[in-house]
Amino acid sequence: SNADTPIQISPVPSKPGGKNQPNELSRSARPDPQIPPHLMAASLWRAVMGTGAPPADATDGVEFWREPERGGWLDKQGEYIKTWRRRWFVLKQGKLFWFKDSTVTRASVPRGVIAVASCLTVKGAEDVLNRKFAFELSTPGETMYFVADSDKEKEDWINSIGRSIVQHSRSMTDDEIVDYDSGRPAAGGKS
């Protein structure tokens, strides 16, 4: 794994007529301080799938182009640069794929994929993001945010992904069971 690769740090060569400064680091060897090393070393793909393989190799034979359990447009927040991008999502056989456009064929290469069995929760996130129709999907190492086009679309995605998590989780103990309605406020505190 790249996470274990040491970063090479080389001293700046001495300038003619100047003093050698062995403790000064060259700019190219210094990692970006804004991005934690564990995020630089592992993309979301490797974190979720546990592999460095490109998304096309990890479809596990899922025919994502044919009869998806759910498909539709969602805005997805970027992994490192927190911009929003519109992507076409396909949920099929325990995998959530996304694509740049909605014409998905056998030759399409997913922009990314999440194995829903690795997901812990899927729930509304309107309060977190202060955006209507927002929801979140969390894995042990990451929380991803999405925005649907309507409240119904949001609820349909939460329900579909929730069902898929339950179907594809190997075994669930009582304290791992997820309440998919927990994203909604309780009704007026009545018992």
Image (cartoon, rainbow, N blue to C red):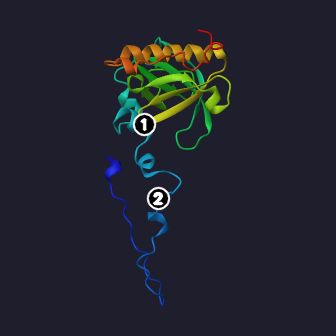
Check the image and report above or below for 107 versus 35: above
Label 2 packing within 10 angstroms: few (<14), some (14-19), many (20+): few
Residue 19 in the image, given as x and y percentages of width and height: 46, 87
Q: Nearer the viewer's eye, disc 2 or disc 1?
A: 1
- Seen at 40% across and 15% down, the residue is 166
The picture quadrant where one finds residue 42 is top left
Q: Is residue 126 visible?
A: yes
At label 2, which amino acid type do we have?
A: Pro
Q: Earlier in the sequence, mark 2 or mark 1?
A: 2
The residue that label 1 is drawn on is 141
- Seen at 36% across and 63% down, the residue is 8
Q: Residue at the bottom extreme?
A: 17
Element assignment for label 1: loop
> Image check: 53 left or right of 77?
left
Residue toward you, 13 or 30: 30
The residue that label 2 is drawn on is 31
Residue 124 in the image, given as x and y percentages of width and height: 58, 22
At label 1, which amino acid type do we have?
A: Gly
